[in-house]
Structure formats: C-alpha cells, structure tokens
Image (cartoon, rainbow, N blue to C red):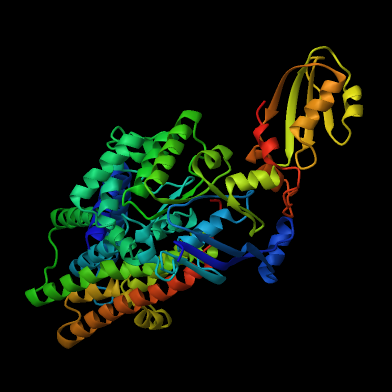
C-alpha cells in the first residue's frame, strides 16, 4: 500500500453570498444565502514512500486545502484518505507522529521565546530521547546552520532564518512524510538555494516529500513528480520529464544571422511557425511546435535563406506549462505527437 | 504528560517575557479592587447589607477579584487569536490533545496570577486592618473549591473561544461572556443581593461556582453537607463543561476553514 492514499477526496466550503454595499450586508442578516464552493473536488492521489511530489496550481486551486486534508486539519466532505495506514482526521494524533508540516506563511515557533525552547518543546511532544535529539540537532545544524539561531527569540529572526528554524522544527522528529506548503515564499535567492539543497538531501535520506509552491525552481530542483491541480481537480499527475514532453510543445530558437534579413522572407520559407525580429537586425526568434516541426527542419529552412552565425534552442521550461495552467489555457491533456523522436531530443541544445 | 508540562512552562515564560504588559494588567486590576473596596466601605458604613458587614465584604471582594484574576494572564483572547489567525492549523498537526494543550497553557498563567493575588491579599491585610480567617475545615473546603476555579474558568473560556469557528470574530462573544460571567458569578455583587428574577438563573448556571461558591465556603455561609453539595456541584460543572467542550470542538473542526495558506 502507498504511503499516502487518497480517493475521491472532496472538500466543500460554504461561502456567504452578499450583495454589494451596506444594503447587501443588511440583507444578508435577514436573508442568509450561501454558495457552496468545492475547494477540492474528487482528488485521487497515491504517493509511494521516498517520492518527492510537487503539488502545483494557481492561487485558490485547492493546494493548501489538500495538504490540510492530508494532515488531518480539515475533515473531508467526502472521499477517503489514509496516510501510513491512519486516517488523518480521525487518528489525528497517530498521524501527527508520522508527519512533519511546514506552512511557509506561518510559523510553529513560539514567537516570544528563543528557538531552542520551541525545539525542546517539540522534543517532549514527540518523545525524543536526549541522544536522538542531540544527534538530530547536529544534523540539522549541518545543513541549516541552526546553531546561530538557537538562542535567538523567534520574532527577532529574519524571514530566511525563521524558515530555517521552522524547517528544523518540522523535521526534528524525522517524520516519514513531510508536507511543505510554500517553503521558499518570500526568501532571497541564496536562502532559497540553501533550502532547496536541504530538501534534496532530505530526499536522499529517503524522506517522502510533498510540496506546494509557486516557485518553479523549487519543483525542478527538488521534485521528480508533479501533480497539477486547477479548480480543485487534478489535471496532470506524472514524472516531471513526462510533463515537459506532453505539455511543453512550444520551442523557441534564437538565431544570429550572418547578415540582416527581413523576417517576411524567413516566414515565407517557414510557414506555420512564428518568426519575430530580434533587437538587432541580424537577430530573429523562431517559435515552433515541436510536435509538428523538428529543430532540424527549422535550421534547414533558415539556411535556405541566409547563413546562420549562432543559434540557441531554449529548453522547454515547466514554467511555460504552469503559466498556461495558471492562465486557464491548459484544459485538456494533449497526447504526444509523432514528431517527437530521439533525433529531435538530442538536438535540443545546439 | 511531559509535553503538557512543557507547554505550561512555555506559557509561563511567555507571560514573563511581557513583564511591562503584565504589570499594567495588574495595576489596572488593583485599581478596580481598591475602588470596589472604597465603594463598599462607604455603603456599609450605615450597617450591613444583605448579611454582609465590612469585614465579610472585604473577604468577599478579595475572593471575587482573585477568582476573576485566575486565567486572566493567559487570556481567552490568546486562545481565540490562534483560531482566528489560523495557527490552529499548526496546532492540529501536533501529536497533542488540543484541549489538554490549551489547558496547560492556561495553567501556565497561574504562577503570575497567584503572585498578584498574594500581593493583593497582603495589601488588604496591611491597609484595612486584617481579614476574616476561616476555621480549618472551611479553609480546606475553600482551598479545594478555589483550585476547581482554574479548570472551570478554562472550560468556559475554551467553549467561548470555540465560537470563533463560526463567528470569525471574538469581540462580541468575549464581551457577552465577560458580562454574563461577571454578573452571574457574583463577582459584581454578591448573588444574595440580586433581585429574584436574576437570582433564579444565577442559581442554575455554572457561573456561581466561580465566585459565589468559594466565597460561601470561605465565609462559612455554607457548612457541612451544604458545603459539600456546593463543592460537588462545582466539580460536576467542571466535568460537564470539560466534556461538553470536547463535543463542541468536534463540531468546530467540521466548520473549520483555514484561509490563505
């Protein structure tokens, strides 16, 4: 059985429906109307031990709600969920021992006391032996630079320091599965790198990770599997590489031409693709669908018109895919086309 | 038990962190107590009212103030704030019983509350010429009753803060609770002085167990079986409200909505 197993997981919230203005508010007092809002709508999910899963979707897609259902904070409206054999909302205390949770936007540290005190309290909560506690603190100090933070009162930490301390708090008891809700939100680049490095090490230790994020760097650096949800429903679930193959259809080739060439001439030779002039008269960018054209075909077409100095083929970024999801453009899942073959894949970087 | 003791200690330390805030709280409280003493001193100069002479009233006011002070350092606002600001989500991911955890934090305030009560009692003895002292049996009954005030007040505050799951705001609920508790516990004026239409509800509500019961035991207004009956009623309320709170919490979790991450 999988470590996390959810079937038809659904959470419906009731939202008051008010007309605008004071009048609307007064009317709501006498005549209460509510609208049902399906935050999570029939999600099936299974995560094996040791996997690292990115859970992605636009704001309000239901990411955090799913995490809260999996951690036992919220009670599902319907559907089933089991984490390490326990039902999180009924066996909340049992489940809590198996999991570590980090909500990037909240802290679990005691705001008014030194970080050390919060960690000592967690030691007591999880019944950690003094030896194990010491060993964990040393390990977390290695990767998170914790020692400097221990004597500092939590409210005096910078955001980056706070996140490091919070990560330590979430991982102190060496949980089987760690849920990270926006673990790098608001962090500067160097701290982000450090957090990601830490998450990679965690993954190597065999910890199961599930993270929600808007930061695509987090996904590429840490996760091998991505689940995309929108409006409470799952629209993709599979390996990161597969997602790129299936969704990242658009390739962009930037060319440095030997001499200035009007884009119309190139467009004439290359129908069905988009040719746009660059900043300099010798620069053009060709955007094409890699399911209908290969990079080789594009180069050949350009060479018919003009000599090429240099070219650069942009790696298909998950960013493009996710951006489409966010923009609501990715509603159905396209199947891979015949043009995708090994030859084209090897020609991705020129 | 270890994590709950840990929470209790953390709560005490948190309160001690804000020493100035605590000091202001107790200065305000002391002013109110001094004011009450002055008003009743003036009223009772003509003779006793409702069976209370000045010496008894002094003890009554001190007990009313002390039972009011229990639980005030931790504060139901703190508990409500964790629900309203969504920290309840983090609390729920911990392997702790939510109610016992909040109770432990609540008890963490007792240390500073007892210090304040001791200072207030000493001040009254010093400046108003002594205090009525009960006999050993009544003192024992009073001590037991006074100890029950802490869990009783916690249960009432806890249930009240649960309202935040539905109201999404604590202001109205808190004011209503404070008004009702102050009136029906006897903290405002002894219940014996209330008109019948208020004394009726006061007799059946749990709030009398907060102030009226410990005061009656201290002053020897209830002795023997009557004293034990009052104590039993008080203990029963603690149990009923403690388990009632569990039911409310279970329902509250179903109403829980945590917004914004």
Q: In the displayed orientation, state which residue is furthest to the top.
A: A259
Residue A172 in picture, x, y percent from top left: 32, 48
Query: Observer-nearest residue: A289 or A106?
Result: A289
Q: In the displayed orientation, state which residue is furthest to the bottom.
A: B225
Residue occupying the point 28% across, 57% down = A125
Residue occupying the point 17% across, 87% down = B225
Query: Observer-nearest residue: B89 or A311?
Result: A311
Query: Observer-nearest residue: A156 or A340?
Result: A340
Residue A85 in picture, x, y percent from top left: 41, 68
Residue A17 in picture, x, y percent from top left: 69, 63
**Eyeballing the image, is A216 above or below A175?**
above
Is residue B154 rendered to the left or right of residue B82? left
**Eyeballing the image, is B136 above or below B13?**
below
Is residue A72 rendered to the left or right of residue B57? right
- In the figure, residue A274 lies in which quadrant? top right
- In the figure, residue B192 lies in which quadrant? bottom left
Whether residue A110 is visible here, answered yes or no, is no
Residue B186 in picture, x, y percent from top left: 32, 71
How many numbered callouts?
0
Residue occupying the point 26% across, 78% down = B235
Q: In the displayed orientation, state which residue is furthest to the front.
A: A343
Quadrant assignment for the C terminus of chain A? top right
Is residue B7 rendered to the left or right of residue A283? left
Query: Observer-nearest residue: A177 or A190?
Result: A177
Quadrant assignment for the N terminus of chain A? bottom left
Is residue A219 rendered to the left or right of residue A32? left
Whether residue A318 is visible here, answered yes or no, is yes
């Amino acid at each position: 059985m999988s470590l996390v197993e959810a079937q038809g997981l659904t959470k419906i919230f009731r939202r008051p429906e008010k007309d605008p203005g004071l009048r609307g508010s007064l009317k709501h007092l006498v005549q209460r109307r509510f609208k049902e809002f399906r935050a999570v709508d029939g999600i099936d999910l299974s995560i094996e031990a040791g996997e690292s899963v990115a859970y992605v979707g636009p704001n309000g897609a239901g990411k955090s709600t799913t995490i809260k259902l999996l951690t036992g904070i919220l009670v599902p409206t319907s559907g089933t969920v089991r984490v390490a054999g326990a039902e999180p909302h009924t066996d909340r205390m049992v489940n809590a021992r198996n999991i570590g949770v980090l909500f990037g936007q909240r802290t679990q540290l005691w705001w008014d006391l030194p970080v050390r005190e919060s960690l000592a309290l967690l030691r007591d909560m999880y019944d950690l032996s003094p030896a194990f506690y010491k060993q964990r603190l040393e390990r977390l100090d290695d990767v998170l630079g914790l020692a400097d933070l221990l004597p500092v009162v939590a409210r005096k930490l910078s955001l980056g320091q706070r996140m490091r301390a919070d990560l330590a708090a979430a991982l102190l008891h060496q949980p089987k599965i760690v849920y990270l809700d926006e673990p790098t939100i608001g962090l500067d680049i160097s701290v982000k790198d450090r957090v990601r490095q830490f998450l990679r090490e965690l993954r190597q230790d065999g910890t199961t990770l599930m993270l929600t994020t808007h930061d695509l760097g987090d996904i590429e650096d840490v996760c091998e599997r991505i689940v995309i949800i929108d409006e409470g429903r799952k629209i993709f679930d599979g390996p990161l590489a597969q997602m790129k193959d299936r969704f990242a259809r658009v390739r962009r080739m930037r060319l440095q031409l030997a001499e200035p060439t009007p884009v119309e001439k190139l467009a004439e030779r290359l129908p069905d693709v988009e040719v746009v002039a660059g900043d300099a008269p010798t620069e053009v960018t060709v955007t094409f669908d890699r399911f209908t054209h290969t990079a080789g075909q594009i180069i050949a077409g350009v060479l018919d018109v003009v000599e090429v100095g240099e070219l650069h083929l942009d790696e298909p970024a998950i960013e493009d895919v996710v951006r489409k999801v966010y923009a609501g453009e990715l509603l159905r899942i396209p199947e891979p086309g015949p043009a995708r073959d090994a030859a084209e894949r090897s020609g991705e970087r020129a | 038990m270890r994590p709950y003791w840990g929470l209790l200690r953390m709560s005490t330390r948190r309160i001690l962190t804000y020493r100035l805030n605590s000091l202001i709280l107790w200065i305000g409280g002391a002013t109110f107590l001094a004011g009450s003493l002055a008003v009743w001193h003036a009223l009772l100069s003509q003779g006793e009212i409702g069976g209370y002479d000045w010496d008894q009233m002094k003890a009554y006011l001190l007990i009313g103030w002390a039972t009011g002070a229990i639980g005030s350092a931790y504060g139901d606002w703190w508990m409500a704030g964790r629900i309203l600001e969504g920290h309840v989500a983090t609390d729920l991911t911990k392997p702790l019983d939510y109610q016992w955890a909040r109770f432990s934090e609540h008890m963490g305030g007792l240390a500073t509350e007892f210090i304040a009560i001791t200072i207030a009692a000493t001040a009254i003895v010093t400046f108003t010429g002594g205090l009525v002292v009960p006999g050993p049996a009544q003192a024992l009954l009073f001590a037991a009753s006074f100890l029950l005030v802490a869990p009783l007040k916690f249960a009432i505050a806890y249930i009240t803060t649960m309202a935040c799951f539905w109201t999404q705001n604590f202001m109205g609920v808190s004011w209503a609770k404070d008004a009702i508790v102050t009136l029906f516990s006897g903290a405002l004026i002894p219940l014996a002085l209330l008109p019948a239409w208020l004394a009726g509800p006061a007799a059946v509500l749990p709030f009398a167990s907060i102030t009226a019961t410990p005061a009656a035991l201290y002053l020897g207004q209830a002795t023997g079986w009557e004293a034990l009956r009052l104590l039993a009623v008080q203990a029963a309320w603690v149990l009923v409200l403690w388990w009632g709170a569990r039911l409310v919490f279970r329902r509250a979790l179903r109403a829980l909505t945590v917004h914004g991450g």
